[in-house]
Structures are given as C-alpha cells and as structure tokens.
Amino acid sequence: MGLDALGTRFLLFAKRRGVDFAQAAMLGRQSLNVDAAALSRAFRDFGASLAPVAAAEMLARRAGYAEPLLEALGAQTVDSFDAAPYEDATYLHDFNRPIGPPHLDRYSAVLDGGTLEHVFQFPVALANAMRMVRPGGHFLGILTANNFLGHGFYQLSPELFHTALSAANGYVLEHLVAVEDRPGAPWYEVTAPDAARERVTLINRYPLYLLVIARRVRDVVPFETPPIQSDYQAMWVGGAPGGASRRRPAWLTALSHRLVRPFMRGVRRLTGNTSSTYNPRHYRRFDPTA
C-alpha cells in the first residue's frame, strides 16, 4: 500500500480544501511511492514550498513511509492500523471486525489510501473508518473503481459513497472525484445520482480512482438502517427525484447501447481520440490546483 503521485496530490488538495490533519490515522501504514521531483512539484502546484532536497529527505525518513508527508500537512500525531504486524503499524486490528474505544471519535482525519477494497466485510470496515473520525473531522479515501478487476475484492461505485457518506450516517460528502491512473489525467467532480435523476455510470479505458473527502457532522452509528440505492429508494418511497417517473425509458437505454456508443467509439477511432468520454451531466471537469 502506498501513496503515489496522485495520492500525494490528493492530500495536498484536501489540505487546501480545509482538512485538518492534526490527529491523523492511516488504514494500513502507507508508503510514499513517488520520486523527489514529483513530490516537490506537487507541493509547488498547490501553492506550498518543498525544495527537491527537502523532498528527498522526506522520502528517506521513516523508511519511506508516509508519516513525514502527513506531518508536513500539519499532523501532530499519525497512527496507522493494520491486520498484520509486517509494516509496524501503530495498532493491529482486523477491519473485518468492528473497532471500539479508544479509537472511536478520535481523529481529525482518517485516510484510506487503498485498504478498504481488500477487506471482505466492506461495510464493517467502512463503518470503522467513519466512526474513527471525530465530529468536524474528515474521512479521506483513494478507492478503486473501473478497470481494477482482480486488484482487491471490490471495484467501487460513486453511488456507494453518495449514499453511505450521507446525513443519515452522520456525514456530508464534500468532494467525490474521479480520476484515471495515467499521467496528466483530468479530475472530474462526480454528480450525485439523486441530483442527476438517473444512474451515474461510466465506461472508460483506464484504471479509475475515486477520491473521497467527507466531513463527519454527527456522532451516529453508520448503517443502522442499511443504505438503499437512490433510484430504488425513490421508487419505493415515491415522489422523490430519481423515481420511476424520472428514469430513462428502457427503449432509450437500449438505443444508446446498440447505436450511440458504438458510433462514438467509431468516431474516436477515426479521429485518433481513444480516450474515455465523460458525460458532462455526471462528470464536471475541474482544476484541483485552482
């Protein structure tokens, strides 16, 4: 497990968006998998200063683990959690099982840098991470979505985080970002399905990460009522945006699959543009350094 160039940029983005790293926790003890030049450049892009020499020193400290980066972002304490002792995590805990005191409501920032998709009891593990955050603090996630088949147990959907990190579970989802695992890939803010009034889907060509910033606003136990996918919730409850009357007709979906998508693939091949196409209703491109 480790923070690459994208992961370090995400943490700098989170810091700029007001995340407090003072009491930080990592799920898994994350390493820094980035070179000094890229680390220095990331700090510069986000308006901070880190000379290449200082970046090299940061990478050399703590045997290459991520505590020095978090300390540079303001961490006074950094704890790590793992199920096995091989990376000398601060605490040993199997996230398949509920976590308890003294770790509940404790941290200003809890970072999942690539752990949760490897935990079989995913709802238990996510609830653990959510409960470790103190009210006012943030849960941060770098999670696998499309084209990570076989990487872990799960590839995860935007719908999951829009639904799970909700007011009912004590959270406000401040940012959900989709970004492909390739140099220079654009960042996209992902629209909530209930706001789009349809399912927010994507078929793309490259491994895709979801970057999550969610603030805890209430001390409640997550998932006491299991979340329901938004369009089903609307249909069952009735009268809410995204309900049956708002859903795309079946014939239109079939037409898109049979005609529109193959046509667009053909256009991209003819024009030499083989990159993914993001629906602007669902994915809003933005500059994270702005």
Image (cartoon, rainbow, N blue to C red):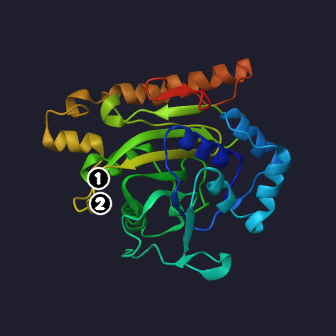
Marks 1 and 2: which is nearer the front?
1
The disc at residue 222 is 2
Q: Amino acid at mark 2?
A: Pro
For label 1, the crowd category at 10 Å Cα-Cα, with few meaning under 14, some 14 to 19 and many 20 or more, is many
Answer with mark 1 or mark 2, whichever residue precedes in sequence.
1
* Residue at the spot of label 1: 170
Check the image and report above or below for 116 versus 196: below
For the residues bearing labels 1 and 2, Cβ distance under 8 angstroms: yes
Q: Amino acid at mark 1?
A: Gly
Please state which of residues 107 and 269 is positioned toward the viewer in this rendering.
107
Q: Secondary structure at mark 1?
A: loop
Instruction: Examine the image and state in which quarter residue 135 appears.
Output: bottom left
Asked whether residue 289 appears in the rendered view, the answer is yes
Q: Residue 172: x, y in percent?
A: 34, 44
253 with respect to 2 (left or right): left
Residue located at (21% from left, 33% from top):
244
Which image quadrant: the C terminus?
top right
Instruction: Examine the image and state in which quarter residue 79 appears.
Output: bottom right
Check the image and report above or below for 263 versus 148: above
Instruction: Examine the image and state in which quarter residue 239 appears.
Output: top left
Residue located at (58% from left, 46% from top):
209
64 with respect to 276 (left or right): right
Q: Residue 22: x, y in percent?
A: 52, 56
